[in-house]
Amino acid sequence: MKVIKVIPCLDIREGRVVKGVKFVDLKDARDPVEAAQAYCKQGADELVFLDIFATVQNRKTRLEWVRKVRAVTTVPFAVGGGIGSLEDMKALLDIGVDKVSINTAAVKNPNLISQAVKEFGRDHLVVAIDGKKNPVGSRLPRLEVVVRSGEESTGIDIVTWSKKVEALGAGEILLTSKDADGTKEGYDLEMTKAVAEAVNIPVTASGGAGKLEHLYDAVATAKASAVLCASVFHFGEITIPEAKKYLKSKGISVRI
């Protein structure tokens, strides 16, 4: 039985952890260094750091923000946002980041995936995919890839893109539903399951966690290999130990 990971996510704006709903209406949540320390002590399996405005603002990841969090992080540490080249990736890996996560840059230049895998190895590369649902009859994919923090539609089907990402060598996929993000109404099970069943690499479910049952559904129903949470952890509604204890009680294998 595969071990399911529980992963807190730090969405960063101006050096602070923020959280919104459907990628907008961002509110200040907490200090990223304090959050990283707390989550590592609580037993997080990994930590994800996303510089969420880097791509929209056409800038690189703020390395000074990453360094501060990396200094206190004791679990595998993934960073995304504003990464558009092998040089950007190397700069992050050189300061101790374990994994780099690319999203918009991968869609714009899929060859960047294979180049990164060749240069750094697949274990160091995550391809993040943001998606939304379109209504039936819209002539757009039911599950569509969006980029630039959800601001730009692509016309690309999520399952098709996920298969290509895997074929190009990516080590894992971080899948976020824009529609579910921050709603606390549950992960998009349709989207997550469609991707998880289409590829053989791990898929992390992201967007919508609001209660313990949602974590179980993402794993049991949607076949996710990991669950990523933000609001419920940042605001103390669920703790990492509570999440793991619950999943274990439901027969899910987790690291306690």
Image (cartoon, helix red, strand yellow):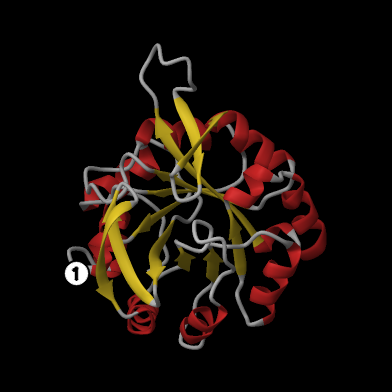
The structure residue drawn at horizontal position 45% and vertical position 50%, both measured from the top left corner, is: 149
Whether residue 13 is visible, yes or no, is yes
The structure residue drawn at horizontal position 22% and vertical position 49%, both measured from the top left corner, is: 184
Three-letter residue code for mark 1: Gly
The structure residue drawn at horizontal position 48% and vertical position 86%, both measured from the top left corner, is: 68
The structure residue drawn at horizontal position 45% and vertical position 68%, both measured from the top left corner, is: 45
Please identify the residue farthest to the left as the structure is shown. 237
> In the picture shown, does residue 52 fall above or below 148?
below
In this view, the residue in front, 255 or 156, is 156
In the rendered structure, the answer to whether residue 61 lies left or right of residue 254 reads right
Q: Quadrant of residue 29?
A: bottom left
Please identify the residue farthest to the top as the structure is shown. 137
Q: Quadrant of residue 156?
A: top right
Q: Position of residue 113 (x, y in %)?
A: 72, 50
In this view, the residue in front, 211 or 103, is 103
Q: Position of residue 205 (x, y in %)?
A: 42, 47
